[in-house]
Amino acid sequence: MSLLLRDVIEAIEGLYPTPTAMSWDRVGLVTGDPEQPIRRIHLAVDPTRAVVAEAIEFGADLLVTHHPLLLRGIHSVATTTAKGAILTQAIVADLAIYCAHTNADVADPGVSDALAAACGLTDLEPLALDEGREIGRVGLLPEPISLREFATRLATALPPAPVGVRVSGDPDAPVCRVAVMGGSGDDRFADVRACGADVYVTADLRHHPALEARDEADGGKPFLIDAGHWATEWLWLGSARDRLLEQLTPVDGPADTVEITISSLRTDPWDFLVSAATPGSTTNGGPR
């Protein structure tokens, strides 16, 4: 007997329960029939047109994404809109879509655990609480290393993206205690200072909050690393695949094989980076 979508949903929600999602979030089944058979599952960070097309090309019956497709209200699913085109593309191909967002962020292990593993951290503990859920992680490196070496190692562990890894701090300063938050995290600077982290790894660091955080540190610790939203969350897909396969593989008896693939597409929105001028020089009259 084939696995049904409802069986897969039960397995996903056993790992990432929907009630643990933040109150503002929209997680769960977006489109699909709970009674449809599932033989191949495709995982991705974002439900873009290209990702949906990739899932269909791979013959997937279910696309599981981290980010929701319908986070905010819409009033039309006509193909004249991007979301309408994506939904129509999926429905016509009989491709179900399911999203696990902040419920995967707060899971243990979850998104920040995967980022902590990429950083090489041990002795993990939560960074903070949000709506009563543990978010982010704080851990230790095996031994202190320079900020430059830590950032370089992290860059090699992340999937490549044009924006790269942005670092603020003394490149030669030693770091050992590291705070991480997969995805956007510039609303957690107070928690990072409170936990005594030497460096904070997250993404989407905006100009003013980052400047204020560096002023609060008076040029010292915690240093900041912006490793990119897509890259810091893509790491979770491997853990999700392994855990889901374990849940869907029967212990006894013949197994109905389900294949789980991970998207090869980079859904970071940036395509290329123009290098800045050498520090100290000027371009178009402005400081660089």
Image (tube, rainbow, N blue to C red):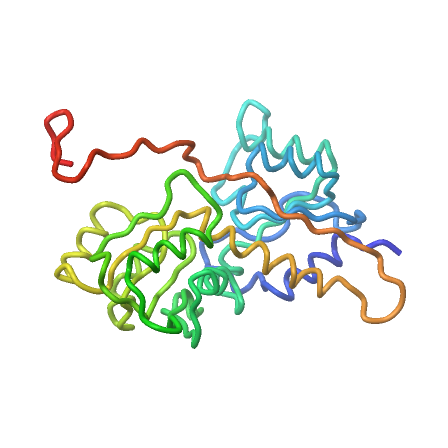
Depth check, front residue: 71 or 58: 58
Image x and y of residue 20, in percent? 52, 65
User: Residue drawn 15% across and 28% down?
Assistant: 283
Image x and y of residue 124, in percent? 43, 74
On screen, residue 195 versus residue 105, left or right, reads left
On screen, residue 283 versus residue 251, left or right, reads left
Depth check, front residue: 274 or 36: 274
Q: Residue furthest top?
A: 80
- Which quarter shows the N terminus? bottom right
Q: Residue furthest bottom?
A: 123
Image x and y of residue 175, in percent? 29, 67
User: Residue drawn 41% across and 65% down?
Assistant: 136
Depth check, front residue: 161 or 58: 161
**Residue 30 in which image quadrant:** top right
- Which quarter shows the C terminus? top left
Residue 229 visible, this angle: yes
Tally of marks:
0
User: Residue drawn 55% across and 36% down?
Assistant: 48
With respect to residue 280, does 256 lie above or below? below
Image x and y of residue 230, in percent? 46, 46
Residue 191 visible, this angle: no
User: Residue drawn 35% across and 60% down?
Assistant: 150
